[in-house]
Image (cartoon, grey):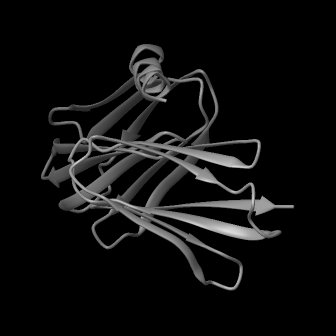
């Protein structure tokens, strides 16, 4: 499982190009991406109002955003695919656009085979990660807390589970992720 997780992360690094740049004194944001995955891109303001949204499924994509009509302040540009979410914090001030922070969050990878669910999560912060499983009546049927681990791996056995719809909830220090499975 460790090799699968590292292969996935290494594959992400080798197969993709993602670039967000600004042009000084032009209020332009330039976004370029080469990816094999479907990706959502969003631009939104500090009050969470979406200014731009697009689903991209091209292998190669490039777009220039003219931000001249935006008022001074903080904005966020995000890219999100099945494996990760990247958030760029942008400051618009006068005629300048500046990227002040980039935050990348790996998402858990779920794989189901023979009534087993395999969970992998790259947890670079080593903060606590909680794993909960709920049935369709919202009853907690499994709970686990993982502490100080960079690589979270878990095999969840549903071979003896009752027929039902289950929700797997993974909570790290910043996000909560959901995966639904049906046992028949």
Figure label count: 0
Tell whether 76 sits left or right of 117: left
**Viewer-proximal residue, 90 or 119?**
119
Q: Residue at x 62, y 83 (%)?
A: 138
Using the rendered view, name the quadrant where residue 99 is placed.
top left
Q: Residue at x 39, y 31 (%)?
A: 31
Which residue of the protein is positioned furthest toward the right in this rendering?
A: 184
Q: Residue at x 74, y 65 (%)?
A: 161
Q: Position of residue 63 (x, y in %)?
A: 46, 31
Q: Position of residue 162 (x, y in %)?
A: 79, 70
Using the rendered view, name the quadrant where residue 96 is placed.
top left
- Looking at the figure, which quarter contains the C terminus? bottom right
Tell whether 54 sits left or right of 44: right
Q: Position of residue 123 (x, y in %)?
A: 30, 44
**Viewer-proximal residue, 142 or 70?**
142
Q: Position of residue 151 (x, y in %)?
A: 34, 39
């Amino acid at each position: 499982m460790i090799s699968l997780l590292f292969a996935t992360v290494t594959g992400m690094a080798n197969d993709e190009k993602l670039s967000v740049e600004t042009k000084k004194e032009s209020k332009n944001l330039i976004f370029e991406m080469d990816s094999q995955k479907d990706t959502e891109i969003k631009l939104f303001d500090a009050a969470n109002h979406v200014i731009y949204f697009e689903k991209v499924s091209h292998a190669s994509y490039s777009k220039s955003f003219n931000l001249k009509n935006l008022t001074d302040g903080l904005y966020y540009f995000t890219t999100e695919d099945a494996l990760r979410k990247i958030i760029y914090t942008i400051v618009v001030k006068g005629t300048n656009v500046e990227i002040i922070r980039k935050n990348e969050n790996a998402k858990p990878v779920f794989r189901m085979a023979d009534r087993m669910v395999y969970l992998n999560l790259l947890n670079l912060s080593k903060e606590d990660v909680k794993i909960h499983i709920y049935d369709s009546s919202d009853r907690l049927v499994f709970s686990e807390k993982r502490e100080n681990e960079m690589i979270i791996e878990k095999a969840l056995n549903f071979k003896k589970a009752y027929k039902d719809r289950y929700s797997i909830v993974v909570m790290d220090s910043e996000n909560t992720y959901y995966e639904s499975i049906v046992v028949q």
